Image (cartoon, grey):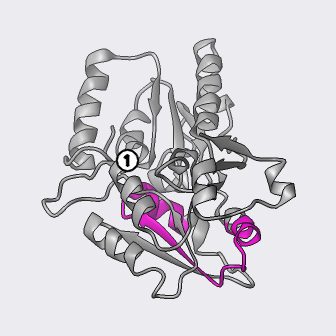
Amino acid sequence: MDTKDFKESAFQMADKAWHKFNEVKPDLVILGDDAALKYLGPKLSKTDTPVIFLGINNNPREYDIIGKKNITGVLERPLMKRSISFISRIVKPVPEKILILFDSGITSKASVENELKQIHMEDTATDIKLISSFKDWKQTVLDSEKNGYDVIIVGLYQTLTDENGKNVNGKDVLNWTSENTPVPPFAFWDFSAGKNKTIGGYVLFGESQGKAAAEMAVKILKGTPPVQIRIEIPEKGHFLFSKSQLKKWEITLPDEIMSRASFVE
């Protein structure tokens, strides 16, 4: 439904998607994030059309689709605690305080609730902020160092809005953050690593979600009922780093991480 990029509400986008579903009458539906599953899952569960979800950060029980015979899918569970642990091995001296930034969208809230509320790092304090406006995001980044943070981790940022309530392009958010942050910026997802973006880190790749969902789709189209395909969590984290960002921040990776890492640029 692409609710991150449109001013229209998730309800409005869900209505459009539901109309399109009834118009097209597809053989199979793939729902690509928490908003799509929340607003379309219950409706689609009352049809006979097979449904696969992916990129879901919340517990799918919250969307009333567990046990529905025509629905299965792929959960996304960012490995945030492990990512923070690896950052503590990369940045020297060891960060005493890390700031994690997310927008305030549905996916971000689900990520925070499921993955971050239990984080208790022995040597590193971790603060999490969910932000709605790009203005507040900018100020939070600019104030990070003076507020005692040694590192920023960029989570999701696609639903930030400008002073007119219009969605801000995610690329612009990353570019501004990269250029203006006073402390090293890391990331949880691969799409946030690169030149004029973040350093990267121990990240998730969206490709693994799409691949797992596609494999489910093939099985279903060949005759396997969705109810016979278990919901799965396919992704494993990988080290991905930006060469230019490592150079900018004068970070040298430990040998054990360097040998396992991939690089962009």
Q: What residue is shown at x 64% (from left), y 63% (from top)?
A: 80
Magenta residue check for 51:
no
Left or right? Give the position of 243 relative to 146: right
Q: Is residue 76 found left or right of 252 in the rendered image? A: left
Report the residue at 66% width, 79% height from top. 95
Magenta-drawn segment: 84-113
Q: Would you place residue 30 above or below residue 2 in this image?
A: above
- Front in this rendered view, residue 145 or 228: 145
Asked if residue 27 is positioned above or below residue 112 in the image, the reply reads above
Instruction: Give the x, y percent position of residue 23.
Output: 25, 18
The C terminus: image quadrant:
top right
> What is the quadrant of the N terminus in the image?
top left
Q: What is the secondary structure assignment of the residue under circle 1?
A: helix
| Camera-nearest residue between 100 and 196 | 196
Q: Nearer the viewer, residue 39 or 3?
A: 3
Residue 142: x %, y % from top left: 38, 76
Residue assigned mark 1: 171
Measuring from the top left, give residue 28's x and y in whole percent. Answer: 47, 21
